[in-house]
Amino acid sequence: MHPKRLADLLFLYAGALHIGHYTVAHGVQVVPGSAWQLVSGSTFCALAAYRWTLPPDETKPSAYGPLVYVLVALCALTTLLTAGLIVA
């Protein structure tokens, strides 16, 4: 797998986790204090979908830069939070 595709999959995963965590915590109602999860999740998914349509040659694998490390940490955090809410 091309490294760019891996970064795109991480963005998609993080976006889905954010949306999933928001949905598990609040259902379908909009809670202003937690709406950042819904907005950031949608943004991550949209960014991944846009970049997935580009050929791998048009973007370098490091195009995300240090944001990839933040994204991996965010994926781990939201996975733990979502799993904690589902178990509880």
Image: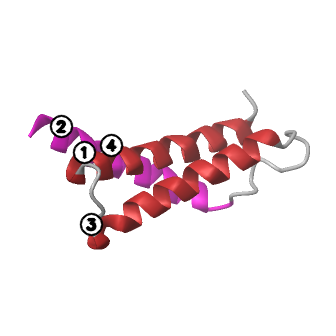
SS of the residue under disc 3: loop
* Residue on which the image places disc 1: 24
SS of the residue under disc 1: helix
Q: Nearer the viewer, residue 31 or 64?
A: 31
Residue 12 coordinates in the image, percent (x, y): 56, 42
| Image quadrant in which the C terminus is located | top left
How many marks do you count on the picture?
A: 4
Give the alpha-carbon distance from disc 3 to disc 2, as whole Å: 19 Å
Residue at (34% x, 49% y) in the render: 78
Query: Vertically, is 26 above or below 31?
Result: above
First in sequence, mark 4 or 1: give its number. 1
Give the alpha-carbon distance from disc 1 to disc 2, as whole Å: 7 Å
Residue at (74% x, 40% y) in the render: 52
* Residue on which the image places disc 4: 79
SS of the residue under disc 2: helix
Residue at (42% x, 54% y) in the render: 74
Give the alpha-carbon distance from disc 4 to disc 1, as whole Å: 12 Å
Q: Which mark is residue 86?
A: 2
Q: Which mark is residue 39?
A: none
Q: Give the magenta range.
A: 65-88
Give the alpha-carbon distance from disc 3 to disc 4, as whole Å: 21 Å
**Are the residues at dot 1 and dot 2 in contact (C-beta closer than 8 Å)?**
yes
Query: Vertically, is 61 above or below 38?
Result: above
Give the alpha-carbon distance from disc 1 to disc 3, as whole Å: 12 Å
Give the alpha-carbon distance from disc 2 to disc 4, as whole Å: 11 Å
Depth check, mark 3 against mark 2: the one in front is: 3
In magenta segment, residue 76: yes
* Residue on which the image places disc 3: 31
First in sequence, mark 2 or 4: give its number. 4
Residue 73 coordinates in the image, percent (x, y): 43, 53
User: What is the chief secondary structure element of the magenta stretch?
Assistant: helix
The amino acid marked with disc number 1 is Val
